[in-house]
Each structure stands twice: as structure tokens, then as C-alpha cells.
Image (cartoon, coloured by chain):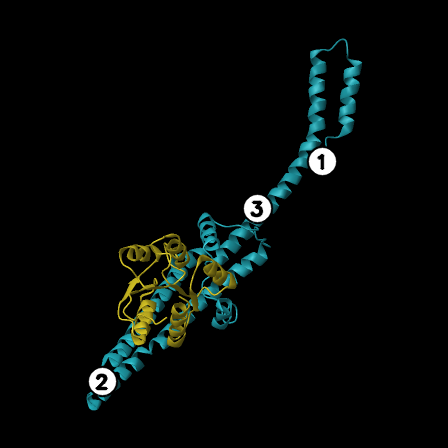
Amino acid sequence: MALPDASHFDRLVALLKQKRDNVTFHDIIALAEISAQSLQSFFQALDATLYRELREIARYIESMRHEIGALQVNDLKNSRIPAAGEELGAIVRATEEATHTLMECAEAVMAADASDPAAYKALVDEKMLVIFEACSFQDITGQRIAKVVETLQHIEERVSRFANVVQAKDLEGFLTESERARAERREKLLLHGPQLAGAGVDQSKVDEMFA
Amino acid sequence: MAIDMSMPVLVVDDYNTMIRIIRNLLKQLGFEDVDDASDGSAALSKLRAKKYGLVISDWNMEPMTGYELLKEVRQDPGLAKTPFIMVTAESKTENVIAAKKAGVNNYIVKPFNAQTLKTKIEAVFAES
């Protein structure tokens, strides 16, 4: 940023030295004029710098508005994420229903009286057909999962693009209040959930620890 | 020590399907008196109301986990000696060590089969 022109101050000092004893109203006006001149160049330089910086900020805000718009947050919040949640809920219900049906068949076969082979075979055949039908849940849930994966990819692409454009840096250790509470509970009660294949200890390792 | 198949068994899990699976497996093994609870606090109430010969519990449940239930059981003089098997997907080494330290009798990693459940129950009663 430009500084006031020092030569104007020199003129001001010279005038004050010259008129130290008998200052008139005219002198005061002259003093004011010199002060105004000295500050004018300062404010001109300041205006140009400020304008340039404000334009930069405005351009950045405009580009941010564009990038935030490209994120399509309202579409994500109002449509895609709730739809993915509904798909996941439907998957849980479908797998529960299928498991219930399969177990019901297994329990019926196990409880059946095998003393009449013909009746027993008829029951087993009937239950096997129900089992085949129930297994169709896998096709439907597969399609539902594909839709959820598509939504996740949609979000991932937009968030990645946004992060690249704004050169986002992660705040280290940032957690919301509820995330912090969940993390503390997980830590305290050793809640890790199911491990991926090969990640946790298997039954044989557990057995060694209890041997 | 021979297993008393008439002893009541308490199965603790927040998933009905899992309860049903364990119930059926226990029934196949010969246990007839099987109750269930959906979390640690419900299990604790049942344990204080009826004498159970064995507890088979999941770890990850709300509001009281199986790990908290295990610690409560071991601290309660009336329940402290109840055999306790953890059946869980929590399969990190630190979980197994923590459960062992808290006094679990055995530990089964999900998914498991009938033979594993049978072997672990037998092992628990063989040591007692």
C-alpha cells in the first residue's frame, strides 16, 4: 500500500518553522491545503489497491458460489441422500424378511414328523420352493445397493472436485459434538464393529488366547 | 463336568435373527430352557430375577453393551460365577484381551457354526 508523499510533509514542516510566532487564519488554511494534498496521493493509491483487492475477493466469492452450486447440495440433501437412506432401509427389511422366511422353513422341516415319509417329503419339497423364492431377495437388494453406490459416487465426484478447486485442507481432528460423543463411547467400550476379512482376529487366534 | 441340559440359558443380542439362530442351535444341542434379552440392561434384570446356568451375549448393543454386562455380572456377588460366553463380530485382539480380563469364559467370533458353539459351551463347563 502507498505511503503519503514525504515531500508534502517537508513543506508542512517548513511552513510551521517559518510561521512559528505569528500564525494567521490564512496560514491555517494553507496548512489544511498542504495536509489535504499530502493525503490525496495516499488515498488515491489506497483506493486503487483496495479496489483491486475487493475485485479479487468478489471474483473468489463468485467462483465459490459457482463451485458450491456445482456441488448441488440441495439435490443431495433433499433428494439423493434421503433416497439412498430409503434404499438402505428397504435392503434391511428385505434381508430380514428373507431370513425370517428361510428360518421359518428350516424350523418347520426340523420340527416335522418324519414317520410318514411321503408327507415328510411333500413338506420338505414345499418348504424348499419357499426357500428358493425367498432367495430372490438377493437380486432386488443387489439392484438397490447399486443405486446407493451410484449416489455415493455422485457425492464423491462433486466433493472431490470442490476440494480440488478450493484447495481444501482438512482441519486436523475436527469432530462435531455428536461425532465426538460417539467416538468417546466407541473408545471407552471398545466398539469396533465387524472387521473386514483378514483384518480382525479369527476364531483360531481367539482360541489360542483362551488356551 | 457334565452339562446340565435343563439349565436355563440367556441369549443376549439386539438382532432377533441372531437370537433365533442361537436359540435353534441351542435347541439342537439339547437345551430347552432358553430366554433372550435385547441388550445388557434387559439381560441384567433377567439375570437378577432368575438363575441362569449360562449367558451367551453379543458385545455391540445399546444402551448397555455385552462388555458392560459382563463387568456388571462379575461385580455382582450373586451373579459373579455365571458362565459367560461372548459371541460377537468385535474381533480385534484388544477386544478379546479386554473381555478375558473382565472375566469372560469364552469368546466366539461371528459368523460361527453349531460345532463352534457346542465346543465352546463344552469347554466352559469342562473348566468349571
Q: Colour of chain A?
A: cyan
Task: Please tell me which of labels 3 and 1 falls first in the chain.
Answer: 1
- For disc 1, the marked residue is A2
Between residues B123 and A39, which one lies in front from this camera angle? B123
User: Dot 1 lies on which element?
Assistant: loop
User: Dot 2 lies on which element?
Assistant: helix
Between residues B18 and A9, which one lies in front from this camera angle? B18
Q: Which chain is yellow?
A: B
Could you say which quadrant of the image residue B36 lies in? bottom left
For the residues marked 3 and 1, what is the alpha-carbon distance in whole angstroms? 23 Å
Left or right of residue A210: residue A100: left
Kind of residue indicated by mark 2? Leu
User: Dot 3 lies on which element?
Assistant: helix
Name the outermost residue toward the bottom: A118
> Marks 1 and 2: CB-CB under 8 Å?
no
Between residues A173 and B76, which one lies in front from this camera angle? B76
Quarter of the rendering occupied by the N terminus of chain A: top right
Point out the frontmost of discs 3 and 2.
Answer: 2
Residue B94 x %, y %: 51, 61
For the residues marked 1 and 2, what is the alpha-carbon distance in whole angstroms? 96 Å
For the residues marked 3 and 2, what is the alpha-carbon distance in whole angstroms? 76 Å
Left or right of residue A17: residue A159: left
Name the outermost residue toward the top: A22
- For disc 3, the marked residue is A58
Relative height, residue B66 to residue B115 (above, below): above
Residue B4 x %, y %: 31, 70
- For disc 2, the marked residue is A123
Kind of residue indicated by mark 1? Ala
Residue B111 x %, y %: 41, 72
Task: Please tell me which of labels 3 and 2 falls first in the chain.
Answer: 3
Left or right of residue A152: residue A108: left
**Crowd rating for badge 1 (residues with CA inside 10 Å; few <14, some 14–19, many 20+):** few
